[in-house]
Amino acid sequence: MTKKSDAPSKRTRVKRLHERGRYDRETIYSILDATPVCHVSYVIDGRPAITPTLQWREGDRVYWHGSNASQMLRAAKDNDVCLAVTLLDGLVLARSALHHSVNFRSVLVFGRPEQVPDHEKEMRMRNFLDGLYPGRWESLRPIQAKELKATMVLSMPIDEASAKVRTGQPVDDEEDYALPIWAGVVPLAQTTQPPEADPRNLPDVEIPDHVRAIKPG
Amino acid sequence: MTKKSDAPSKRTRVKRLHERGRYDRETIYSILDATPVCHVSYVIDGRPAITPTLQWREGDRVYWHGSNASQMLRAAKDNDVCLAVTLLDGLVLARSALHHSVNFRSVLVFGRPEQVPDHEKEMRMRNFLDGLYPGRWESLRPIQAKELKATMVLSMPIDEASAKVRTGQPVDDEEDYALPIWAGVVPLAQTTQPPEADPRNLPDVEIPDHVRAIKPG
């Protein structure tokens, strides 16, 4: 459980197509930082369950949060979990069916999340929100003690983790390159559309810079 | 395990923010059909693991595939898994920190996947590829017996499944609507970029219609 992420453990060693495996912190952190969406899996009644949720990273730890009443948080706390972040970067079309693929970046983090103590929760929530929208926290109605009390924040060290990355063109069987079949990559990107203001905004409220600056992926 | 997806089971009933839960097949199928990317969780040595992979739907079953040597496929076959598909549709900015949210569509399918028999594998792989790229299968070098032999296809009924969907503007505390804070939604969409032809394509090969027609999400 204390395996450092710069070398694979039994669980994190990429076994299939192992040349795609990466274990350096720079790669792992850059993927975690590229999107908040993650999937957390945990075992409940001996069977696997997944909850999609939002994660953020601070240093060498990953965080997520939810209601105190969340079944996922209660099942995950102090128990084994696997947290996955995956970005789809492109469709890869090859000259034969089974060499079709996708370009992607993914990270798995294994560990046992701990509950963030009460006195840290406000700071963690602020770091989460300001990480997505720099400066937004200051512009909001202050968070209330009862809101913090109803919130659980979990945190896990990024110790046993691995990344897997595929980029570039298809890799076909050598003899298939002679075939007159179009092969290539269709890149995919997550893009923002123009912000849609809440119709209940006060009339003189202007869109802040941190909203204009949002760039996902 | 034989719960039909038009009513929740103990595992699939959406507990948090239950008004976002949906159990009708139309909603569940439309989310599964919107993206091939999924996360499959399974238990290995008593602990949870996740593998991101690609899924496709045929009727009331979900399929995925990989190498016969895949640890995930071997661990998942005939054992309990949870398969998740999640689409991020927008960032939801509220007037207080904890009412920030995201718009999303997600599906969970619980079950025990079965191995697709050998004589069905070619048909299933064809359905997968033609589902993503209609007509592509016919244009390819034929699949080989040895390729099919090295491939495992798993399939699971969509019986115990649930969807969760959030749309629209933030829901703030009533008194906060009087505050001069910009609130709203930043919609997100997965978009395609112009196709990048493999430099090793033969000189007279043109881009097929099924590549131009790709529209994810």
Image (cartoon, coloured by chain):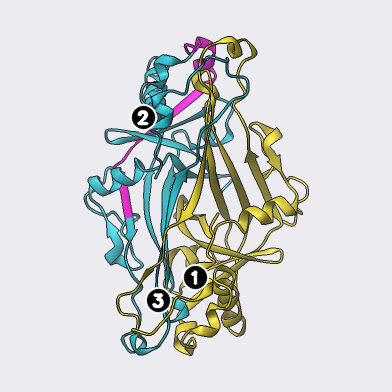
Chain colours: A cyan, B yellow
Work out how far the residue at label 1 is from the one at label 2, CA to CA, in angstroms: 37 Å
Mark 1, residue position = B211
Mark 3, residue position = A183
Q: Is residue B29 magenta?
A: no
* Amino acid, disc 1: Val
Local secondary structure at mark 2: helix
Q: Dividing the picture into quarters, in which one does residue B15 lie? A: top right
| Dot 1 and dot 2 within a common chain | no
Work out how far the residue at label 1 is from the one at label 3, CA to CA, in angstroms: 10 Å
Q: Is residue A48 visible?
A: no
Name the residue located 53 percent from the left edge and 16 percent from the top edge.
A147
In the image, which disc is placed on residue A7? none
Q: Left or right? Give the position of A29 relative to B19.
A: left
The image shows residue B5 at horizontal and vertical percentages of 74, 52
What's the chain of the residue with tag 1? B
Mark 2, residue position = A131
The image shows residue B115 at horizontal and vertical percentages of 58, 72
Work out how far the residue at label 2 is from the one at label 3, CA to CA, in angstroms: 39 Å
The image shows residue B203 at horizontal and vertical percentages of 33, 84
* Amino acid, disc 2: Gly
Q: Dividing the picture into quarters, in which one does residue A165 lie? A: bottom left
Quick one: label 3, few (<14), some, or many (20+) residues within 10 Å? Answer: many
Q: Is residue A143 magenta?
A: yes
What's the chain of the residue with tag 2? A
Q: Are marks 2 and 3 in contact (CB under 8 Å)?
A: no
Q: Earlier in the sequence, mark 2 or mark 3?
A: 2
Quick one: label 1, few (<14), some, or many (20+) residues within 10 Å? Answer: many
* Amino acid, disc 3: Ala
The magenta-colored residue range is A141-163
Name the residue located 30 percent from the left edge and 58 percent from the top edge.
A13
